[in-house]
Image (cartoon, rainbow, N blue to C red):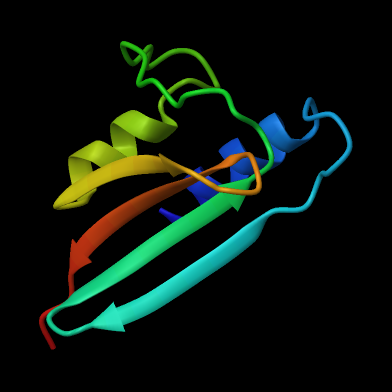
Amino acid sequence: MVSELVTNAVRYAMYAAGRREIELLLMRVTPHVLLAVADPSDEVPTPKEPDFISENGRGLYIVETYSQCWGWDPLARGGKAVWALFRADA
């Protein structure tokens, strides 16, 4: 999941004017783990119909399939944070 969200963030950061940094947050809030990746792009993440032959376009489908829930929030400084919540039973 980290790879999917970071890959998307890197892709969209390349097209953002000015800033290009991305941030990764992993936080344990028992019994969950929150994964969030921020990037400077204001483009809204939208899942695509998965094409299982193509090399890309399945990231959010995978995140949606394996997480309890996911979403995104705009950031006050511009850009967005895409997040996913996972149950982490130990």
Quadrant position of the C terminus in the picture: bottom left
Image spot of residue 20 (x, y percent): 81, 44
Q: Of 1 and 79, which appears nearest the observer?
A: 79
The residue depicted at 55 percent of the width and 21 percent of the height is: 55
Provide residue 34's location: percent of width, then percent of height.
Answer: 32, 67
Name of the residue lying farthest toward the bottom:
90
Q: Name the residue nearer the viewer: 81 or 53.
A: 81
The location of residue 7, given as percent across then percent down, is 61, 42
Please report the residue visible at 36 percent of the width from the left and 14 percent of the height from the top.
Answer: 48
- The answer to which of 77 and 7 lies nearer the viewer is 77
Vertically, is 68 above or below 18?
below
Q: How many marks?
A: 0
User: Furthest-front residue in view?
Assistant: 76
Q: Quadrant of residue 23?
A: bottom right
88 horizontally vs 28: left or right = left
Position of residue 9 relative to residue 45, above or below, is below
Where is residue 73 shown, x and y percent of the image? 41, 43
At a point 31% along the width and 53% down the height, the residue shown is 84
Give the residue displayed 24% in from the left and 59% down from the top.
Answer: 85
Image: 55 above or below 10: above
Give above or below for 63 relative to 89. above
